[in-house]
Image (tube, helix red, strand yellow):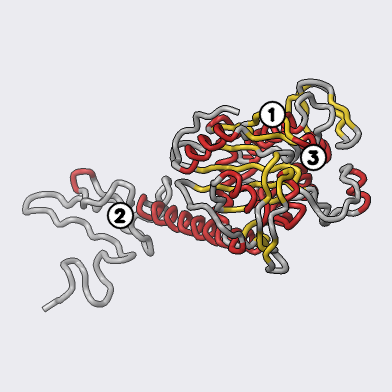
Amino acid sequence: MNDWPQGWNADGGGYGRGGPRPAQQPAHGMQPTAAPPYGHVPPQQSQGYDDRYDGYNTGQVYGGGGDPQGPPAPARRGRFKRILVTVLIVLLLVSVGTYFWADSKLRREVDLSIVKDRPEAGEGTNYLIVGSDSREGLSPEDQKRLHTGKVEGKRTDSMMILHVGANGNTMVSLPRDSYVTIPEFTGSESGKNFPSPGQAKLNASYSTDGAPLLVRTVEFNTGLKIDHYAEIGFGGFAEIVDAVGGVEMDIPRDLKEKNSGIDLKKGRQTLDGEQALAFVRQRYGLAGGDLDRTKNQQKFLSALASQTATPSTVLNPFKLYPVMGAGLDTLIVDEDMSLFDLASMFWAMKDVTGGGGKQMNMPIAGPAPGGSLKWDMPKVKQLVSELKNDDPVTVTD
């Protein structure tokens, strides 16, 4: 019995691959008909194959020639998923690498654990942000260019309390000439206890024993606990401004003063690091003296934060890394400050200075001895109570 399908035989006969197809055998009484041309299948005799196929063809794979629309949808989806996963992995690695790079640059040099007799913590988080006149890292040429002088050591040029809370963020500038009591304290280097020096300008506490005594003095005179401390010097401030490409400001009038080195014309313009430093340092030639200077500092921080925290900077590594590097290299913080705390502080500053929070000076009652400024203590107590309870601030300066 022949096991091959009908019309085939084992020795290659019949009309298999490459073989001729025989004429059809007519029924009794009919004339034989010629076999159709090879490869032709009349429509009524379609074998069920797609019309794209030409029938029998030596070595031809049915459906060959490719789909002009590309690979099927499942293949395209699979390729897209692989690309997406690859991109996410790369972003994760870059993010992790950036985190550890930035964390290693933070200068955690302030030990708040030595601050004695601290107030109880309230709601929200309080940062003490300080701009110092440190000349660290500045060459003689830099000191001349930035009009910093050659004074040894460092003093505070600006001080602000930033409260971050659920009911809005508040920035309170502390005039450096505030007349306050400097309390007894533990020396940050000696570990010895020192008696109270009495009443003096607020910036005297910093020049006496640095950041720990400044924090101690602010807490003693306000009753508000400081959770974190951040300080930047002259050089770092100028580098940040230059790294971000300058800061656009609208200068209300011509400004020129030799001590700060400021020399600006009225109108909208972009300040570089040297000009920006002069703007925030100027105190002479201003009608309100130190109070007007704190307002200029807040105005500049508003412009700096608004122009730094933008997609063009944050999403551009060629701008982001220089800005972060310039800030982190010179930023001094407390030992417990994390990058997340620092980010929270920065975004809260942007929110406040951008109009989403409240900016004010510590309420002032009037002049005090030695050209200093006396706080309005009833208002100060109300302000501190609202901050500690994280209530909306109603006090005005």
Whichever of labels 3 and 1 marks the residue nearer the N terminus, that label is 3
Q: Nearer the viewer, mark 2 or mark 1?
A: 1
Q: CA distance from mark 2 to mark 1?
A: 104 Å
Q: Are marks 3 and 1 in contact (CB under 8 Å)?
A: no
Q: Are marks 2 and 1 in contact (CB under 8 Å)?
A: no
Q: Position of residue 145 (x, y in %)?
A: 90, 43
Identify the image quadrant of residue 147: top right
Q: Amino acid at mark 3?
A: Leu
Q: Which mark is residue 366?
A: 1
Q: Amino acid at mark 1?
A: Gly
Q: Which mark is residue 55?
A: 2
Q: Which mark is residue 277?
A: 3
Q: Nearer the viewer, residue 60 or 156?
A: 156
**257 above or below 221?**
above
Q: Nearer the viewer, residue 216 or 26?
A: 216
Q: Secondary structure at mark 3?
A: helix
Q: Position of residue 70 (x, y in %)?
A: 43, 49
Q: Position of residue 43 (x, y in %)?
A: 22, 43
Instruction: Kindly give the residue lying farthest to the left in the view shown.
Output: 28
Identify the image quadrant of residue 62: bottom left
